[in-house]
Image (tube, rainbow, N blue to C red):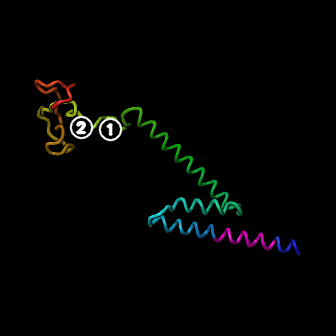
Amino acid sequence: MAPILRRFARHAWRGIVLVVGLVLIAAGLVMMVTPGPGIAAILGGLALLSTEFAWAKRVLDWVRRRFAAARAEVRRRTTRSSRGPAPDGGTEGVGAGGPRAAGAEVRSTGGAPTGGAPAGGGAPAGGETRPREGRDPQSTTS
């Protein structure tokens, strides 16, 4: 009689793990569109299911590999952008305020604006910068 009870207990346990794991995954899917830790619930459900089912272990291993690849890609992009300007010639690393922050005055050389700067807020296209008359660019007082 003991082997039959053991077999029944094993199947009952697997059934409980299946139901709880699927409920966690379903709750995670709902939380993906509502407030809540959806990804954590899905991963928790997969982790629980992987304790009893080989298919869930394969899915969890796939998710881990994808996460590791995504993390490596983010690190690769982050280290590249912190070394200097962006490949497209962007202004990463330039301090807030641009040339005006250091006390420079922007004067137009007659170039036509390209629409990149807001009215009165930035340097016109074709503008040049030079220190203001009678003002020390290193001074912190206004």
Q: Amino acid at mark 1?
A: Gly
Q: Amino acid at mark 2?
A: Gly
Look at the image and give the residue range highlighted in magenta: 7-19
Residue at 57% in and 47% down: 68
Which quadrant of the structure image shows residue 20?
A: bottom right
| Relative side of 130 to 37, left or right | left
**Which quadrant: the C terminus?**
top left
| Relative side of 90 to 134, left or right | right
**Which quadrant: the N terminus?**
bottom right
Residue 139 drawn at (x, y percent): 20, 26
Q: Is residue 3 above or below residue 57?
A: below
The residue where tag 2 is placed is 97
Q: Is residue 22 above or below residue 50?
A: below
Judging depth in this view, the residue of 127 and 131 nearest the camera is 131
The residue where tag 1 is placed is 90
Q: Is residue 94 above or below residue 48?
A: above
Residue 107 drawn at (x, y percent): 12, 32
| Relative side of 104 to 46, left or right | left
Residue 78 drawn at (x, y percent): 45, 40
Circle 1 sits in a helix, a strand or a loop, which is it?
loop
Category of crowding for the residue at label 2, using alpha-carbon neighbours closer than 10 angstroms: few (below 14), some (14–19), many (at least 20): few
Residue 9 falls inside the magenta stretch:
yes
Magenta span: chief secondary structure: helix
| Relative side of 75 to 14, left or right | left
Number of on-image labels: 2
